[in-house]
Image: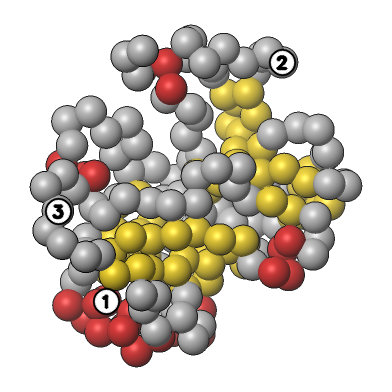
Amino acid sequence: MILTDKQILEEIQKGTILVEPFNRDCLGTNSYDVHLGRYLANYRDEVLDARKHNKIDTFEIPEEGFVLEPGKLYLGVTLEYTETLAHVPFLEGKSSVGRLGIDIHATAGKGDVGFCNTWTLEISVSQKVRIYYGMPIGQLIYFDVKGGIENYYNTKQDAKYNNRTITPVESMMWMNEW
């Protein structure tokens, strides 16, 4: 079941959902709008290797915006830091962003219960488009969990994305044992 606006507010008051900064105007009927953070990143190498640490170069979005190019992967970050301690958060793009040809994630739209951080975005575009720091970029949807939880993400010893950040985080696939 998806939480409604009233339920999201109740969970915020209970402390099981945290959004910083929180703006009541960003609360939709059953979602919360998030915004593009100040930083983007690109991978340094043209060919990425799933078994190696692929380094990124991080840069600030200028005041006049930044033009995204098709055929390139950009890592972005949400302005909002979130904590979700009792629900499964899903990040989806806003329809107005999709209508500009912007995809905000390739595969990583679901968060885990216990995820506490900003959200790294996997941004790609179908044609050139100028984006801006602070623009609405996505919406968080919260789902109820059925049953108890044994492993909250923020307490897992092997969780790779637990360090609070305001910049995009590159893939940590290379840390997996396989």
As drawn, the residue found furthest toward the bottom would be 6
The residue carrying mark 2 is: 46
Observer-nearest of 6 and 25 = 6
- Residue 33: where, in percent of width, then height? 52, 71
Earlier in the chain: of badge 1 and badge 2, it is 1
Kindly tell me whether residue 59 is visible in this rendering.
no
As drawn, the residue found furthest toward the right would be 127
Quarter-of-image position of residue 97: bottom right
Label 3, residues with CA under 10 Å away: few <14, some 14-19, many ≥20: few
Q: Find the distance from the CA under tag 1 to the CA under tag 2.
A: 42 Å
Evaluate if marks 1 and 2 touch, with contact meaning CB atoms under 8 Å apart: no
**Residue at x 47%, y 73% (from the top left corner):** 32
Q: Secondary structure at mark 3?
A: loop
**Residue at x 26%, y 54% (from the top left corner):** 113
Q: Find the distance from the CA under tag 3 to the CA under tag 1.
A: 20 Å
Q: Secondary structure at mark 2?
A: loop
Q: Find the distance from the CA under tag 3 to the CA under tag 2.
A: 40 Å
On screen, residue 66 above or below 173: below
**Residue at x 64%, y 56% (from the top left corner):** 133
- Residue 94: where, in percent of width, then height? 64, 67
Q: How is the image coloured?
A: secondary structure
Left/right of residue 138 with respect to residue 14 in the rendered view: right
The residue carrying mark 3 is: 149
Q: Which three-letter amino acid code belongs to the residue tagged 3?
A: Ile
The residue carrying mark 1 is: 12
